[in-house]
Amino acid sequence: MAPSSQLVVVTGGSQGIGRAVVARFLAAGYAVATCARSAEALAQLEAELSPAAPAALHTLSADLSQHADCQRFAEFVLGLKLPLAALINNAGAFAPGRLQDEPANGSRLREMLAANLLSAYDVTRALLPAFVARRQGHIFTICSTASLMAYPNGGSYGIAKFALLGFTKTLREELKTQGIRVTAVLPGATLTRSWDGVGEPAERFIRAEDVAEAVFSAFGLSPQAVVEEIVIRPQLGDLL
């Protein structure tokens, strides 16, 4: 089946790793559907990528920390009537801080879980029947090295990323006999807006394009093989 007749879904695709993944799959000829909270950012993405793309880019403004928007995005994707080749759960949010300094009502934890875990859970659950019906496809979750090791000032973000890795491991076990591959991607410090103002040189970070290339390479394996986890760190090690 030609790539252009298959759909790759990327959440949070207007910037950073998500944008790089959108660009990589578009360049390979796949139709891509993506979302972001900012309609303006999505319009800019289309203006920059669509003219040279060999396949269609479909966008929808949605806040995936909200269950209703996850459902709306999934309905948008399914309404395109294209077979799903891959889902890359990339949408998320970062808020540094210590647990002991967070609001006592738990609002920070709920915010981080909604953005980083429940967004992936809700979109995956909504699209999963389409993958299962075809008995093929690939689901990626963009976790973090924070999913493997707690670090100072990680707070509720770290909790959410640990949970996201657990979600991915559970999916892998459930779907291995149904022809669907599942991969956790765990990048360290990547040159995105989350690190604005840190003061480190660009070469100290992973390039978002390197993460996208790793995703695309894992996607390109035969159906007989799956890369379960991809851990990527800066050459000089983690930034804490």
Image (spheres, grey):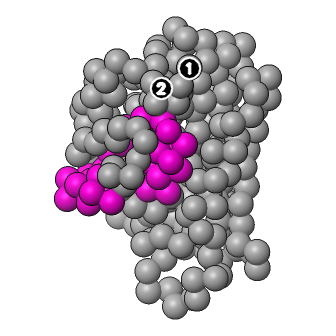
Q: Is 206 placed left or right of 101 in the picture?
A: right
Residue 163, image x and y in percent?
57, 44
Q: Main secondary structure of the magenta part?
A: helix
Q: Nearer the viewer, residue 103 or 210?
A: 210
Say if 83 sits above or below 199 in the image.
above
Q: Which residue is found at the position 52% from the left and 8% from the top?
A: 133
Q: Nearer the viewer, residue 136 or 164?
A: 136
Quarter of the image where the N terminus is located? top right
Residue that label 2 marks: 6
Identify the residue at the far left of this view.
Answer: 40
Q: Is 105 placed left or right of 118 in the picture?
A: left
Specify which label sits upstream in the sequence, 2 or 1. 1
Q: Which residues are magenta?
A: 19-48
Say if 52 sits above or below 119 in the image.
below
Local secondary structure at mark 1:
loop
Amino acid identity at mark 2 = Gln
Residue 211, image x and y in percent?
62, 57
Crowd rating for badge 1 (residues with CA inside 10 Å; few <14, some 14–19, many 20+): few
Q: Are marks 2 and 1 in contact (CB under 8 Å)?
A: yes
> Is residue 20 shown in magenta?
yes
The answer, for residue 104, to whether it is visible in the render is: no
Amino acid identity at mark 1 = Met
Q: Quadrant of residue 193?
A: bottom left
Q: Viewer-nearest of labels 2 and 1?
A: 1
Tell how many labels. Answer: 2
Residue 56, image x and y in percent?
35, 38
| Rendered image: mark on residue 1 | 1
